[in-house]
Structure formats: C-alpha cells, structure tokens
C-alpha cells in the first residue's frame, strides 16, 4: 500500500470509508485543480522570499524526499515543498524552515486575518476551517517529530493581512522583479502576510482530537494513536469501523454513485425499507434538513411534509403566485415517494419576459480575486474583471456575439481595456441588460467607484460606464433584468435537483427538452459563431473541454486566468487555456439565451398567459 500522505490522512480522519474509497483502484477521487495548485505554490513562494538559503524540491515525491533529507543536513535552510517520511507516513510541507533553534512547519492559508492576531489559541472562537488547518499541521508535526525526535518543532500559519494596501504595482509578479527592485518587493511581501504562532494549538490538537471534528472512532485519541488506528484499517472493507451515517457524509464525494458504480450509502447504509437509496436529504433544496437529520432521516422518501401542502394539487390550489423554495422541496420529497408531480410547472409571472425592451443583451462577467494585489493601492482579494461575453438578441430574432478576454502581459491591469471593450458592444446603451444573479450590476458599480478614485483622469470612462449601467432611452429600473428571479419565482423543472444555478438550470432544460414529447419545444439552434453543438450533449460545460485542463466553473476560470497573469502557465498551455476561457464565458452568456427562448416558448404555448403551465 502506498504511504499515507496529507490527503489520505485527512480522508481517513474524516471517515475510514473515505480512506477505503481513496485507495481503491476503482475509485480515484482526487481530482486536483492544477491552476489553483499553481497559484497556491506561487503564494507559498511569496512567503518564502523572507527567508534565506531557499531550496525548492522536485515535483516527484521520492526525489523530493531525497532532496529534503540532504538539505536538512545544512545548518540553516528553507525548503519549499519539503517531503518528510517515517515508515508508512509521509507529509509534504509547504515551507520547512530549519535554524539553530529548531524546525518550523509553515502553512499558508487564504483567510484574511488582522496583524494583531499573533497566536492561535484553542478556544471557542476558532472556526471550523482553522481547526482543520490545525489538524493537518498536527499530522505534519507528528511525522516530523518521529524523524527528528530531539528537535524543537514549531508551527506558523501565514495569512493575508486584512489591513494591507499595496504601495507597489504588480506584486503578483514578485518572482520576475529585477534585482534593483527586489528589496522593495520583499518589504512589501513581509507587510502583506501576518504570522500566527500555532505551536501550542497544534500541540493541543496532537494530544487530543477536538470534539465535533473528525470521525467518532478517533474521539479522545492523540494524533499518534489515530495514526496507529489508520494503519490498522482494513483496506478491503471498513464496515466494522463505520457503522452509521454521520456528519462528514454531507459533502463526501463518495456518497453518491455514478453510472457504473453505486455510491457509498447504497453499498453500506441503504435500509431495507428505502426504495430510492440515491435520493438523499442533502440534495433537497433550501433550508430545513437539520430537523430531519436530527431524527435520523437521511433519505427523501422518509421525510414527512409538515406545512399541509402534501400533494401537488394542494400546492396548485393554495400555493400562491410564486413557486417557493419550500414547494420545490415538497415536490422533491413527493417525487421520491413515487407520487405524481409535474415534470414542468410554470407560473403566469413569466409573462414579464414579453415586456422587456429590445435589444436584449445577455451578459456574463468573469472576475478574479487573489491574495497578491496586482495594482498599487489594492488590498488582498479585490475583484479584478478580466473577461465578458455578451449575446445580443435583436427584435428581429438575430443574435450577435461580442466578447473580450484579457490576454495581455502580466503588468497590464485589465480594467481600462475591459471598459473600452464593454462600452463598444453594438447598441449596449439601448434595451435591457440580462444577467443571472446580481453580480454584473454590482460589478459595473464597483468599476465606476474604482475609476472615481481618480475621477479627473477617468472622467470619460466613468461617463461611458454610467451609460452602460443606466442606458440612454430607458428607466433605470428597467435597465437590468435578473433571469434567475424568473426561475426562482415562476419555473419548476422535474430534472432540477438541489440548486437553481445557471448550469443546473441549463442541464435540466436540456434533459427536459430531450425527453419531452412537446415537439414545439425543440432545442434552440446555436448560432454559427458558437463552437459547441448545445443540443448534442446534456452537459455542454464538459463538452467544451480539451486536453488535460478543465474550466467547469467560475472558480476554475478565475484560477486559470490568475495562473496566466502571473506567468505560471507553460508556453504550450497558454493558447489552450485562453481558448477554454473564451468558450466557458461564451457558454455562460449563451445559456441565458437558451433559458430565455425556453421560457418564451412555454409562455406562447398558451394564448392567454394567465394560466399555469403544467406538463
């Protein structure tokens, strides 16, 4: 069996069954976001710059282990990516600093923290995420202690300073600064991070597992004792170690199955009286699951509906003008019980779509936040708008596409070019800006406020952005239209699960239209400019991927662009990554076009739009 590393330890600590699935050849769960990983290493190197005699280990773990062992023979050394192994236990430490006074394990975390918080204490004020940081550090500390039993071992956590404001441009390019400027950059980076001594808190966690975190098998045990327990876990099955469903199940990637294999609950915890073992309470939309879980009800068909709307007929009769979250939840429960629910339910409120002013600009922005500021005067995690896609639907039915992506070198801050491209979209000052969630409207206001810091210099940009925001020939209240509000209030699709995000709604529409006998609701033809045949796949976001890199959501898009902007992409990757970013953003704005046409076609199915649509 391969050595227990940091990831496998945390899996086993959370649930021994996770350990079983993680080491199973059939179940490789560990899909790493390579863009995010690169950005984290870039952040690590920013912290390491304050130390001396800095060494970087190889990517290969075995080689890194040999390098670490060799370098630690030196008097003082700072090793980035140090690998320490003792028997079957292995850890890879972001920064390991050795001095004459001992060894310091350094972890870098993304949470903002004030400089005044110089130490971490085990008290009731610690959040769950910080406790998880301590557990990982306790494992690392234990492995290092076993290899160096006579050394003093300290632990430090580095966080971005909440009060930091950069006095330099391009701090994200710290690895590319010329030598004459390196002292300024090093001073700035020292101010950017606040250091918290976690040594005593890690020792407390090492001596006894904190209550309420980790699997109950390890309650009251030390980290050393937990490692022995993990060593003895059965590699074939872990049924004897995990007897019940527990708190770690909620976000476990093994709970649900796939086409080829059943999920963990179907294998281990499916009661005899549960028919639909893949319909879990955790997938129910909205709030309200705690009461059910407290009653040990984990499957949807076990849930009792308490609000009196325990059939679709009652919901239709007494439910009101909106489809509420609770009604959606009830429909999921009824469906799991085998009772009839509509495959499609649309309230008359969608008629507001027929009142929108053309042209309709379906617009999507992408933004990045990074702990290393890219511009003088910026703070960690300020929003940077680096991309947009806009599909414009004209009153005659024609569709036009405009897009922009920052592909400039790392020193160029994108907001000027973003503004120029946005304000040049044909007829952007007319009609309606359609978005999904309030993000785009908020982004325009933030851009304007950013330029207002130097209003004389940026007067023209501010005026043009205000025209985009307010329009020329419309009331301000009619300028923006949030399509997610229509879905939330007036639209239900039986293929929806626990979310109302754009991607979930798109997939539910495609599934419904593919399975529906309503031929008048056939799939929308994609424009020639769009590179993905939407109706040929039920997951367009998977269909647009190429090569080893994947951009499936806003987080991976953000991390991909940050990697590009910081110069962390290999030369052969750049074109592919930039093309993926374009496809992803284009698909986001085009998904809104699909949703709009779908809803309008549904409205037109009734000559009188006052009736509900139930199919």
Image: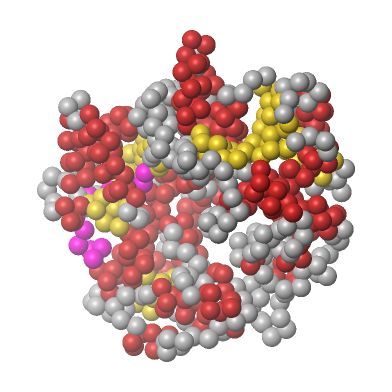
Query: Viewed as shown, does residue 178 lie left or right of 74?
Result: left
Image quadrant in which the C terminus is located: bottom left
Q: Which residues are magenta?
A: 352-365
Choose top left, top right, bottom left or bottom right for residue 324: bottom left
Q: Position of residue 14 (x, y in %)?
A: 70, 59
Residue 41 seen in this snapshot: yes
Comparing 514 with 61, the one in front is: 61
386 is higher (above) or lower (below) than 185: below
Residue ID at (67%, 82%): 274
- Colour scheme in use: secondary structure
Comparing 557 with 226, the one in front is: 226
Q: Is residue 361 magenta?
A: yes
Q: Is residue 244 magenta?
A: no
396 is higher (above) or lower (below) than 314: above
Comparing 343 with 422, the one in front is: 422
Q: Position of residue 131 (x, y in %)?
A: 61, 53
Choose top left, top right, bottom left or bottom right for residue 215: bottom right
Q: Position of residue 520 (x, y in %)?
A: 38, 68
Residue ID at (55%, 83%): 303
Looking at the image, how many numbered discs can be counted on the residues?
A: 0
Residue ID at (43%, 37%): 380
Q: Position of residue 389 (x, y in %)?
A: 36, 42
Query: Viewed as shown, does residue 403 lie left or right of 294?
Result: left
Q: Residue furthest top?
A: 180
430 is higher (above) or lower (below) than 485: above
Residue ID at (62%, 76%): 298
Query: Viewed as shown, does residue 204 lie left or right of 545?
Result: right
Residue 79 seen in this snapshot: no
């Amino acid at each position: 069996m391969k050595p227990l590393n940091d990831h496998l330890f945390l899996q086993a600590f959370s649930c021994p069954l996770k350990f079983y699935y993680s080491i199973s050849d059939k179940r490789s769960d560990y899909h790493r976001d390579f863009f995010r990983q690169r950005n984290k290493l870039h952040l690590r190197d920013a912290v390491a710059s304050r130390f001396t005699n800095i060494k970087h280990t190889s990517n290969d773990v075995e080689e890194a282990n040999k390098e670490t062992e060799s370098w630690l023979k030196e008097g003082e050394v700072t090793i980035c990516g140090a690998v320490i192994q003792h028997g079957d236990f292995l850890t890879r430490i972001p920064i390991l600093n050795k001095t004459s006074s001992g060894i310091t394990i350094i972890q870098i975390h993304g949470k903002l923290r004030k400089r005044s918080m110089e130490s971490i204490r085990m008290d009731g004020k610690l959040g769950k995420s910080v406790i998880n940081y301590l557990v990982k550090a306790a494992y690392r500390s234990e492995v290092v202690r076993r290899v160096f039993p006579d050394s003093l071992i300290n632990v430090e956590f580095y966080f971005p300073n909440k009060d930091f404001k950069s006095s330099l441009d391009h701090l994200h390019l710290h690895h590319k600064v010329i030598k004459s400027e390196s002292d300024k950059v090093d001073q700035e980076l020292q101010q950017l991070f606040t250091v918290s001594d976690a040594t005593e808190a890690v020792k407390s966690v090492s001596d006894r597992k904190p209550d309420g975190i980790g699997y109950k098998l390890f309650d009251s045990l030390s980290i050393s004792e937990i490692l022995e327990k993990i060593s003895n876990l059965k590699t074939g099955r872990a049924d004897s170690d995990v007897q019940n469903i527990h708190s770690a199940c909620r976000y476990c990637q093994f709970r649900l199955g796939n086409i080829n294999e059943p999920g963990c609950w179907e294998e281990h915890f499916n009661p005899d009286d549960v028919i639909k073992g893949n319909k879990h309470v955790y997938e129910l939309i909205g709030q309200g699951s705690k009461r059910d879980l407290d009653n040990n009800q984990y499957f949807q068909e076990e849930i009792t509906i308490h609000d009196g709307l325990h059939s679709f007929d009652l919901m239709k009769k007494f439910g009101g003008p909106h489809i509420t979250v609770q009604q959606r939840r009830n429909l999921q429960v009824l469906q799991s019980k085998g009772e009839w629910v509509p495959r499609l339910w649309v309230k008359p409120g969608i008629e507001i779509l027929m009142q929108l002013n053309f042209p309709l600009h379906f617009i999507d922005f992408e933004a990045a936040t990074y702990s290393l500021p890219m511009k003088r005067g910026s703070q960690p995690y300020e929003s940077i708008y680096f991309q947009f896609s806009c599909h414009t639907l004209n009153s005659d039915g024609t569709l036009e596409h405009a897009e922009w992506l920052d592909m400039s070198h790392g020193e160029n801050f994108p907001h000027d070019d973003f503004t120029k491209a946005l304000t040049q979209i044909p007829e952007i000052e007319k009609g309606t800006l359609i978005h999904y969630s309030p993000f785009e409207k908020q982004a325009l206001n933030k851009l304007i406020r950013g330029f207002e810091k130097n209003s004389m210099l940026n007067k023209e940009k501010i005026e043009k952005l205000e025209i985009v925001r307010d329009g020329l020939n419309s009331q301000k209240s009619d300028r923006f239209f949030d399509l997610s509000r229509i879905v939330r209030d007036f639209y239900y699709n039986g293929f929806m699960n626990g979310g109302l995000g754009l991607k979930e709604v798109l997939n539910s529409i495609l599934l419904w239209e593919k399975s529906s006998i309503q031929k008048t609701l056939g799939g929308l033809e994609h424009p020639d400019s769009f590179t993905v045949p939407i109706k040929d796949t039920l997951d367009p976001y998977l269909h647009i991927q190429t090569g080893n890199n994947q951009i499936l959501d806003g987080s991976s898009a953000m991390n991909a662009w940050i990697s590009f902007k910081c110069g962390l992409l290999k030369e052969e990757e750049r074109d592919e990554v930039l093309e993926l970013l374009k496809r992803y953003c284009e698909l986001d704005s085009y998904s809104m076009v699909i949703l709009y046409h779908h809803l309008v076609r549904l409205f037109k199915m009734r000559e009188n739009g006052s009736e509900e649509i139930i199919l």
